[in-house]
Amino acid sequence: PAAAASAASEATLQSALAVAQSALKVAEATQQQVLQLREERRADAGLLAERIDFMEERLNRRVDEWEAYADSRQQENPIRHLSLGDQIAKDQRVHQQRTGRPLCMSDGLNGAHAADTLKPANGANAGIGALFRRH
């Protein structure tokens, strides 16, 4: 009986040793995978940082180009950079100078239809767009 118990105990120990060796192999493989994933993550972070730097440089170049273009346009034609109210006033003055009539589209119509106000000075309808023609 002692030999049988010893053989059973040895078989149990052998089985436990096999399970422990298998678990060790799994743990080592898992450790390798973790190390590989950490390295890939570092590489991805480096690539991401490079791409962010590239996009930042590109954006800065585009902003610089846009600002230079805006500055050159300002120098070429400073009147384009008027406030909205000043632009409207300028457009009304230009209209008055070209047509001899004020451009009043709100209270100045005195009940007249907008198409009547926008007719050319000679009364012809040729210059009026389709939206303003009377039917």
Image: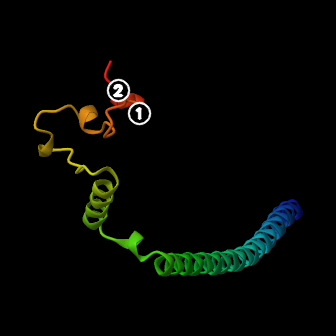
Q: Residue at x 68, y 75 (%)?
A: 51
Quadrant (top left, top right, bottom left, bottom right) of the N terminus:
bottom right
Observer-nearest residue: 67 or 47?
67
Task: State which quadrant residue 26 falls in.
Answer: bottom right
Left or right of residue 41, residue 1 in this image: right
Left or right of residue 32, residue 108 in this image: left
Q: Is 82 placed above or below 100 here?
A: below
Task: State which quadrant residue 80 falls in.
Answer: bottom left
The count of marks equals: 2
Determine whether the residue tagged by mark 2 lies in a helix, strand or loop: loop
Q: Which residue is drawn at 72% across and 76% down?
A: 47
Q: Which residue is drawn at 62% across and 80% down?
A: 61
Residue 55 position, x and y percent, is 64, 74
**Residue pointed to by mark 2:** 133
Between marks 1 and 2, how big is the CA–CA gap?
A: 7 Å
Mark 1 Cα shell of 10 Å, populated few (<14), some (14-19), many (≥20): few
**By what rule are the colours in the image chosen?**
rainbow
Left or right of residue 4, residue 31 in this image: left
Q: Which residue lies furthest to the top in this view?
A: 135
Q: Do the residues labelled 1 and 2 touch (CB within 8 Å)?
A: yes
Residue 111 position, x and y percent, is 12, 33
Determine whether the residue tagged by mark 1 lies in a helix, strand or loop: loop
Q: Is 101 placed above or below 24 here?
A: above
Q: Which amino acid does label 1 sit on?
A: Gly
Residue 78 position, x and y percent, is 42, 77
Label of residue 129 in the image: 1
Task: State which quadrant residue 38 falls in.
Answer: bottom right
Q: Which residue is drawn at 78% across and 66% down?
A: 23
Q: Which residue lies furthest to the front in this view?
A: 122
Q: Which amino acid does label 2 sit on?
A: Arg
